[in-house]
Amino acid sequence: MWEDRLVWEVWEGWEDKRDERYTGLLIFYVWLFNRILSNLFKYLMISIRHAWLSARTGDRCGI
């Protein structure tokens, strides 16, 4: 199957360090995943804080 061959080629490239594309892609995907999680966490914290403050002060306005 072509998926197995692709995985094997990626693994071989990673082991031999002869193709730096896979390392660059891995770093890019880790960076992208980290940015997405960071932004989601930040938005969640802002939303929780806003909901807590508006419940505490009785403010019913939006953000």
Image: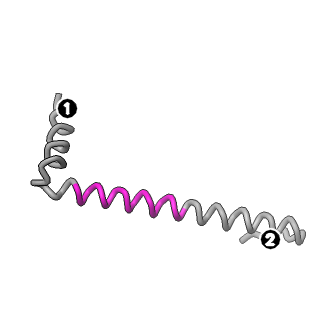
Dominant secondary structure of the residues highlighted in magenta in the image: helix
Q: Position of residue 29 (x, y in %)?
A: 34, 56
Circle 1 packing at 10 Å, graded few (<14), some (14-19), many (20+), is few
Q: Is residue 61 left or right of residue 29?
A: right
Asked if residue 34 is among those painted magenta in the image, a careful observer would answer: yes
Judging from the image, what secondary structure is the residue with disc 2 in?
A: loop
**Residue located 15% across and 34% down the image:** 5
Judging from the image, what secondary structure is the residue with disc 1 in?
A: helix
- Residue carrying label 2: 61
Q: Quadrant of the N terminus?
A: top left
Instruction: Say which amino acid is labelled 1.
Output: Asp
- Residue carrying label 1: 4
Q: Which residues are magenta?
A: 23-39
Write down the quadrant of residue 10 in the picture. Answer: top left
Q: Position of residue 54 (x, y in %)?
A: 82, 68
Q: Is residue 29 left or right of residue 60?
A: left
Counting residues from the start of the chain, the first of labels 1 and 2 encountered is: 1
**Residue located 85% across and 65% down the image:** 55
Q: Quadrant of the C terminus?
A: bottom right
